[in-house]
Image (cartoon, rainbow, N blue to C red):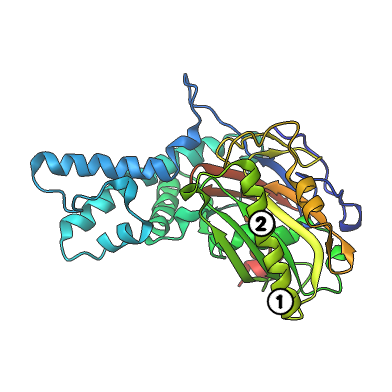
């Protein structure tokens, strides 16, 4: 587990990758690996994209035994979120009922996973859990979140479960704002951010909005470049080069639009990130493999490839992807003290935060 650190002020915040003490929150847990009892697997394996597909396939097999599959002949693994969502509105009630059955099973699995997380030392007094990741951006995902909250309440847990506010594709970029001390962004309009996952890679220009620091409540992604690298199976070297090209394209666009970019790049990446920016573990799903090598450092490579943004040297900060996605939620969590983040995607990402300031009573009454 990550070594615990005490909260520090904004001016004292260490400029280190994977830092636990950030300007507005302290990260007291992330990427925790809770194992199944008497098994080599992790409990989070029961609550990810493949786990839902498995539940849906089980119900489809049952339907085929007694008649026709109401979802048709397409393989479950090939169905998009939009396709599965559409079955909930299908004229054939059997199709909607089948998907709802999978939702119920998955919600129960997700509830069991959350109950195990809530037994971990830093999660025991959690006030709220935010759910993000690509799965959340679907009607099925929204119903799972709502149903899971009811199941938790039925089990005597008073914790609230809420969908992440920003679109998950943007949240993993917007959260990068909170990796940096606010003084590093002063005098600028936007910054570059990157979100690397097991299937997709996104790079974007995060605009600060009118409210700006310290909460950046109306921050947004002005320009976004997306690459589904899973379709290309690139090498690690090719992935880095493609990312450099994407970032350079965004820099050129910002210059054309006369947008003042801060000379910083924030990166969200799976795994446990060392202070020097290398990946300790958890990067096994990244494109090309071998991202955990002691001889590979993504922030260093980006600074070498893009040594300057505007008139200033480039500074890169990298952190775990669930952490960064959770940081995007900071403006909306000021009424609680301790909160968690779970991201449902290729895997189940997790992070837990403690606000550095007392909860705002005015926010609680809104």
At a point 65% along the width and 55% down the height, the residue shown is: 243
Q: Residue furthest right?
A: 11
At a point 80% along the width and 60% down the height, the residue shown is: 264
At a point 45% along the width and 52% down the height, the residue shown is: 149
- Residue 169 lies, in percent from the top left, at 55, 61
Q: Is the residue 59 above or below the residue 360 in the image?
A: above
Q: Nearer the viewer, mark 2 or mark 1?
A: 2
**Mark 1 highlights which residue?**
209
Residue 2 relative to residue 137: left or right: right
Q: Residues within 10 Å of mark 2 (few under 14, many from 20)?
A: many
Residue 55, quarter of the rendered image: top left
Q: Is the residue 25 above or below the residue 259 in the image?
A: above
| Residue 175 visible from this viewpoint | no
- Residue 249 lies, in percent from the top left, at 68, 67
**Mark 2 highlights which residue?**
194
Q: Choose the circle earlier in sequence order: 2 or 1.
A: 2
Which quarter of the rendering shows the C terminus? Answer: bottom right
- Residue 313 lies, in percent from the top left, at 88, 59
Q: Is the residue 252 above or below the residue 351 in the image?
A: below
Q: Secondary structure at mark 2?
A: strand
In front: 112, or 277?
277
């Amino acid at each position: 587990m990550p070594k615990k650190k005490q909260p520090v002020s904004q001016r004292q915040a260490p400029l280190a990758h994977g830092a636990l003490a950030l300007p507005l929150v302290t990260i007291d847990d992330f990427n925790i690996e809770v194992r199944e009892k008497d098994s080599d697997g992790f409990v989070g394996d029961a609550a990810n994209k493949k786990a839902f597909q498995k539940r849906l396939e089980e119900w489809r097999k049952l339907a085929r035994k007694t008649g026709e599959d109401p979802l048709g002949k397409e393989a479950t693994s090939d169905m998009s979120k939009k396709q599965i969502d559409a079955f909930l509105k299908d004229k054939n009630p059997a199709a909607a009922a089948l998907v709802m059955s999978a939702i119920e099973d998955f919600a129960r699995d997700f509830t069991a996973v959350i109950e195990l997380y809530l037994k971990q030392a830093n999660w025991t007094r959690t006030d709220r859990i935010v759910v993000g990741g690509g799965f959340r951006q679907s009607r099925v995902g929204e119903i799972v979140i709502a149903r899971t909250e009811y199941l938790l309440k039925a089990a005597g847990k008073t914790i609230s479960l809420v969908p992440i506010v920003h679109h998950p594709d943007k949240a993993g970029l917007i959260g990068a704002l909170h990796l940096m001390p606010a003084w590093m962004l002063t005098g600028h309009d936007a910054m570059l951010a990157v979100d690397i996952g097991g299937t997709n890679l996104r790079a974007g220009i995060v605009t600060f909005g009118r409210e700006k620091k310290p909460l950046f409540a109306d921050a947004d992604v002005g320009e976004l470049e997306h690459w589904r690298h899973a379709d290309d199976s690139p090498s690690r070297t090719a992935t880095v080069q493609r990312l450099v090209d994407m970032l350079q394209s965004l820099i050129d666009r910002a210059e054309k639009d006369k947008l003042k970019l801060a000379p910083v790049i924030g990166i969200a990446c799976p795994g446990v990130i060392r202070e020097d920016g290398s990946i300790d573990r958890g990067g096994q799903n990244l494109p090309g493999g071998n991202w955990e090598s002691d001889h590979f450092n993504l922030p260093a490579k980006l600074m070498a490839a893009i040594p300057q943004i505007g008139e200033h040297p480039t500074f890169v900060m990298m952190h775990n992807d669930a952490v960064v996605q959770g940081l995007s939620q900071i403006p909306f969590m000021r009424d609680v003290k301790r909160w968690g983040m779970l991201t449902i995607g290729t895997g189940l990402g997790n992070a837990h935060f403690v606000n550095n300031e007392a909860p705002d009573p005015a926010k609680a009454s809104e």
